[in-house]
Image: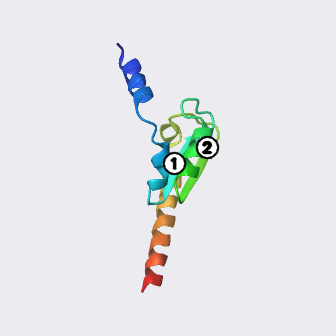
Amino acid sequence: MSMISESSRRIIARPDSRPDLAKIGCPALVLCGRQDVLTPPALSEEIARGIPDAQLVILRGFAHRVIWESTAQCATLIGNFLEQTQETANASRSYAG
């Protein structure tokens, strides 16, 4: 059996974790490519809706390996997300006393 088919078999057999998305207790950034056929944008939208405080970014012109296809753009998006998350955390702490 090839490595790809073994990987695919394991992915198909794993339990559906979508019901657990609501348990994620930290901000999340969901990135996907508009042309992704393996994890279509509709599934990324579902993931983002399931996670409290999630942000979704769908990048046009890219597919499943968006982070490799658009490394600089993804790095900027992730950096901005982390800065925003830190600013929110700092603001919350300053109000807490």
Mark 2: few/some/many CA within 10 Å (<14, 14-19, 20+):
some
Q: Residue at x 49, y 43 (%)?
A: 18
Residue carrying label 1: 74
**Residue 37 visible in the picture:** yes
**Residue 74 picture location, percent across and down:** 51, 48
Q: Nearer the viewer, residue 56 or 77?
A: 56
Which of the colour schemes (rainbow, by chain, secondary structure, one colour) is used? rainbow
Tally of numbered tags: 2
Quarter of image, res 46: top right
Residue carrying label 2: 59
Q: Residue at x 59, y 49 (%)?
A: 57
Quarter of image, res 7: top left
Q: Residue at x 44, y 27 (%)?
A: 12
Q: Would you place residue 27 above or below residue 31 in this image?
A: below
Q: Amino acid at mark 2?
A: Leu
Q: Residue furthest bottom?
A: 97
**Residue 73 visible in the picture:** no
Q: Would you place residue 88 above or below residue 63 in this image?
A: below
Q: Amino acid at mark 1?
A: Cys
Q: Secondary structure at mark 2?
A: strand
Do tag 1 and tag 2 residues touch (Cβ < 8 Å)? yes
**Residue 16 picture location, percent across and down:** 46, 37
Mark 1: few/some/many CA within 10 Å (<14, 14-19, 20+):
some
